Amino acid sequence: MKFSDPHSYTDSEQGKIAHIQFWIDVDFSAKVLKIKATYRLEKPVSGSFFLDTRDLNITRVYKDDQEIPWEIDQHDSIVGDRLHLKDLDGLSEFTIEMTTSPGASALQWVTPKQTAGGEHPFLYSQCQSIHARSIFPCQDSPSVRFTYEATVEVQRPLVAVMAAEHIETEHLEKTSQYRYRMPQPIPSYLFGIAVGNLAFEELGPRTGVYSEPEIIESAVWEFAENEQTLIEAEKLFGPYLWDRYDVLILPPSFPYGGMENPRLTFLTPSCILGDRSRANLVSHELAHAWTGNLVTNATWEDFWLNEGWTTYAESRITEVIEGDEYSQLYASIRRNGMLKVMERFGMDSDKTCLKYSQRGIDPDEVFSVIPYEKGASFILQLEKSVGREVFDAFIKKYIATFSFQSLTTEGFISFLERELPEAIKNVDIDEWLYAPGYPESAPALSSSLFDEVKARIDAYESGTLPDSHQIADWVPDQIRLFLLMLPERIPVEDCRQLESIFNLKDSHNYFMINRFYQIAVQSGYQDVLPGIERMVGSDGRMVTLAMIFRTMVNEEWTRDEARPMFERHRDKHHPTTVAVIEGILNKAGL
Ligand code: BES
Ligand code: ZN
């Protein structure tokens, strides 16, 4: 059967892009990128060649001085617009000139007011899953890889960074030209660019951090351990093949916690908490350098191969760096969170399966933690069935075998059959991959940090609130787990008490207090509204915002507050986030 990706017009039988040479002119006043891109194909192509695009203003397609006939001949609200290059005559190179649209779904044009410094604008991309096509025409399927070079021209004193290797910078009178190249072939969703008033600090020989100068010091402190994390990760998964590992701190509207753009992880500023408590975010994005960026899911239906494997890999790193007790505590947070999401979807919903057909479904719409945690539990189950030593050798072989390749779920199973037949015998593969819900046989977790939380939950359920000294040495993730394990609705007075016991009132740890806000809304604790509004105005992460708006529209007392609150902050947020929240409000008839 011919391979096809439900989220792309790519027909790889026509040919494949091998390399792109970009000239990118960043125009903040018009909120567009003006791009000239020369494409080199793997081999000469004759006849038709399809590329994915969305909202692009294409002005010319040519080779030397020869125009190439083209047409946008298919539209789809999810997949976008098909660019059909016609009558190619054994061509292996062509150039496209285009301008992005101000509403390009991959780009966020941040106004100076919404940055830490307040003076310069900021631009960043977020291409996963199917947004690269709104920047440049491409075979926007994770099954196609290409290398690229780029020259990015920006107004001085702005700095352009890319998820690629920096070659040189040339300062002209009014502008600077930054040259980058990506010598390792990447799928289009790992294309990354950002422009802003950026500073850089070294963390170690291969690691560093980019951010606005106003926050660089706190970022350097928060991520001081990145070099060590990289060293530990290499021991587990094999050599790091991307040369450098830098992180870039984005403005608050960044819709995710982190994004594993190669060489340059993009991070939300809300992870800078002054206590290094979100180190797992870096472990996760770094782990993608192997699971995801080297071995890539072939389509977004195989997303669990990226995220499940990476969540497993993340927890292996956490175990080495922070110990087994903490790593298992964190795993139980993930599992608890996932079970809540499964209950919301319904335990028999397709969306609780690791693999199901996503034709006609927007990957942003169905994004959830299920492929992460159910996927990681499946990999852990495989590990347990053969023992760690055997499994560790398998991990290295898996990565070495499929480096710079894409893999389907079925391809992974064939590899498993070949390399770990015992795991196939002992683990119900079909149940894990294709059945809804969470298998009973999932490996158990155990941690004394978890037990302490559970003891307080048991006490709460029999009527005793924790007191301050019982929880004095709790780490933030224990509080988070406690909140996750609380009943959905509790007395208002308990909300007030817990808020004070755990010191939640002035907390900026949105990873933790978002769950408190959820319980508070469900319980009718009215004093939290200003705190919720502060979160809605300052944390751009889609999961956080979607959760709080979903909760608010479901409760009588906050229902009418949801739309006005969203409108007050809508301009601050990313187009994808806005679309998701709009969806929630519209569905609720608001
Ligand atoms: N690759 C994801 C982010 C993503 C997924 C962006 C799907 C667009 C579509 C990234 O690696 C990720 O999973 N980030 C998590 C953090 C992690 C610690 C679970 C996030 O942003 O919450
Ligand atoms: Zn991830």
Image (cartoon, helix red, strand yellow):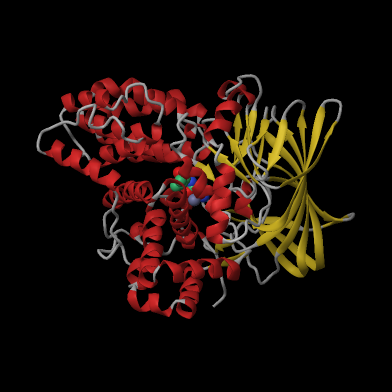
Looking at this rendering, what residue extends furthest in the left direction? 462
Left or right: residue 86 compared with residue 514: right
Left or right: residue 526 compared with residue 153: left
Where in the figure is residue 59, as x and y percent of width and height?
76, 46
Left or right: residue 555 compared with residue 390: left
Where in the figure is residue 462, as x and y percent of width and height?
9, 38
Quadrant in which the C terminus is drawn: top left
Where in the figure is residue 572, as x and y percent of width and height?
51, 28
Q: Please say whether residue 493 is visible from this viewpoint.
A: yes
Who's the residue at 74% across and 53% down the image?
Answer: 148
Where in the figure is residue 447, as x and y percent of width and height?
29, 49
Q: Nearer the viewer, residue 184 or 207?
A: 207
Q: Please say whether residue 549 is visible from this viewpoint.
A: no
| Residue 23 lies in quadrant | top right
* 292 is higher (above) or lower (below) than 567: below
* 82 is higher (above) or lower (below) than 387: above
Count of numbered circles on the image? 0
Q: Nearer the viewer, residue 462 or 589?
A: 462
Who's the residue at 28% across and 29% down the image?
Answer: 472
| Residue 161 lies in quadrant | top right
* 66 is higher (above) or lower (below) than 588: below
Q: Nearer the viewer, residue 390 or 11?
A: 390
